[in-house]
């Protein structure tokens, strides 16, 4: 919004100089606003209030070579994922149905990526699932992923660990790493799925 310049006006102390100065100040603030928003995004170390979000894209993160009980190996099996998201909200709720929708001022992981520096390995703004973060360690220690012993004969050969899916709704919390990377996290137990082979 730009306030128009005034050529003739005089009502006591409110004259054209006053109004034009005000107009210039508004324009200057609007020009500075993107830089201010970026500075806030980079410097903020406080956690946000949790909010609902819908998963919009899933990308593999950590992978393992999954060894089966019959000694076969499924190489590069993902056991954790990065999640892109958009803010979401509950619209209505009654005994029959809960309806959801995007927020009026919807925020996405891409919006966060566009306001902070992008690291070599992962873009700021992505969400991670805390329940997935220990999968590599628990697999190496005792063959478990999401609490299931995947090296045992009872684990079907055609099954794999599965992360969240596009469209899933999660409860996100913002956090900032020691190096200043803004990340979001949620905690949802993962599953296993596949075709019995």
Image: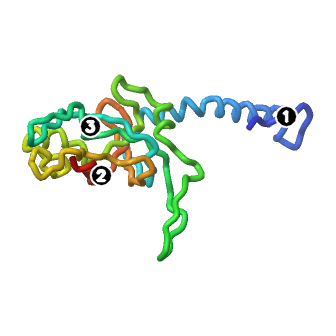
Name the one closer to the observer, 167 or 91. Answer: 167
* 31 relative position to 39: left or right: right
- Circle number at residue 78: 3
- Compare marks 1 and 2 and give the one earlier in the sequence: 1
Q: Residue at x 14, y 39 (%)?
A: 137
The image position of residue 13, as x and y in percent, is 82, 41
**Residue contact between numbered discs 3 and 1, judged by CB atoms under 8 Å:** no
Label 3 vs label 2, nearer the camera: 3
Q: Residue at x 60, y 30 (%)?
A: 32
* 60 relative position to 36: left or right: left
Residue lying furthest top:
120
**Residue contact between numbered discs 1 and 2, judged by CB atoms under 8 Å:** no
Q: CA distance from mark 1 to mark 2?
A: 58 Å
Label 3 vs label 1, nearer the camera: 3
- Compare marks 3 and 1 and give the one earlier in the sequence: 1
- Up/down of 95 relative to 48, above or below: below
Q: CA distance from mark 3 to mark 1?
A: 66 Å
The image position of residue 121, as x and y in percent, is 33, 26
Q: Quadrant of the N terminus?
A: top right
- Compare marks 3 and 2 and give the one earlier in the sequence: 3
- Circle number at residue 16: 1
The image position of residue 97, as x and y in percent, is 49, 70
- Up/down of 165 relative to 122, above or below: below
């Amino acid at each position: 919004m730009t306030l128009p310049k005034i050529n003739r006006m005089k009502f006591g102390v409110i004259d054209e100089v006053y109004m034009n100065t005000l107009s210039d100040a508004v324009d200057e603030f609007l020009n500075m606003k993107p830089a201010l928003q970026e500075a806030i995004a980079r410097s903020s170390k406080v956690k946000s209030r949790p909010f609902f979000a819908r998963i919009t894209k899933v990308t593999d993160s950590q992978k393992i070579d999954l060894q089966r009980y019959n000694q076969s190996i499924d190489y590069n099996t993902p056991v954790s994922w990065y999640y892109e998201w958009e803010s979401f909200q509950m619209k209505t709720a009654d005994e029959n149905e809960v309806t959801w929708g995007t927020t009026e001022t919807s925020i996405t992981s891409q919006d966060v990526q566009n306001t902070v520096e992008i690291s070599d390995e992962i873009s700021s703004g992505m969400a991670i699932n805390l329940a997935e973060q220990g999968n590599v360690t628990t697999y190496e220690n005792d063959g478990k992923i999401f609490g299931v012993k995947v090296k045992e004969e009872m684990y079907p050969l055609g099954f794999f660990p599965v992360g969240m899916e596009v469209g899933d709704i999660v409860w996100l919390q913002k956090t900032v790493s020691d190096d200043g990377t803004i990340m979001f996290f949620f905690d949802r137990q993962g599953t296993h799925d596949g075709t019995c082979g």
